[in-house]
Image: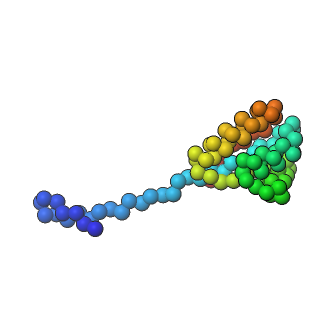
Amino acid sequence: MANQHDNGTVLERQEQKLKPPSMYQVCLLNDDYTPMEFVVAIIQEYFNKDRETAMHIMLKVHQEGRGVCGVYSKDVALTKVELVSAHARKAGHPLQCVMEEV
């Protein structure tokens, strides 16, 4: 589509290229104190995973030091990190939840 200016010059409208928003993965980090069953419950409750998937993620956290629970937009990821961290603290566990840009 072209726009005409008063001096007769026709300028082409430049297509605005929108890039998709950055996505963030939310990860749980291993520690030596948080019970495995608590981690499974957190994954099920806050990341809507079935028990089998939650167990798999928990084992990854336990064996590899971290496990990805999901990938979300920045606002959703931040909210999940805050909710999980608050829940863990309230329950007296040092479980850490972080987000990283994908």
Q: Position of residue 12 (x, y in %)?
A: 27, 65
> Residue at the location (58% across, 47% down)?
74
As rendered, which of 15 and 71 lies closer to the eye? 71
Q: Position of residue 76 (x, y in %)?
A: 61, 47
Q: Is residue 90 left or right of residue 15?
A: right
On the question of residue 5 being in view, the answer is yes
> Residue at the location (17% across, 60% down)?
5
Q: Quadrant of the N terminus?
A: bottom left
As rendered, which of 16 and 40 lies closer to the eye? 40
Q: Is residue 10 left or right of residue 47?
A: left
Pick out the residue farthest to the bottom: 1
On the question of residue 101 being in view, the answer is no
Compared to 100, does 10 lie above or below? below
Q: Give the mark count.
A: 0
Q: Is residue 13 left or right of residue 37?
A: left
Q: Quadrant of residue 55?
A: bottom right
Q: Quadrant of residue 42?
A: top right
Q: Position of residue 69 (x, y in %)?
A: 73, 52
Q: How is the image coloured?
A: rainbow
Pick out the residue farthest to the left: 7
Compared to 34, does 23 lie above or below? below
> Residue at the location (73% across, 53% down)?
48
> Residue at the location (87% across, 36% down)?
33
Q: Is residue 55 left or right of residue 80?
A: right
Q: Position of residue 67 (x, y in %)?
A: 76, 50
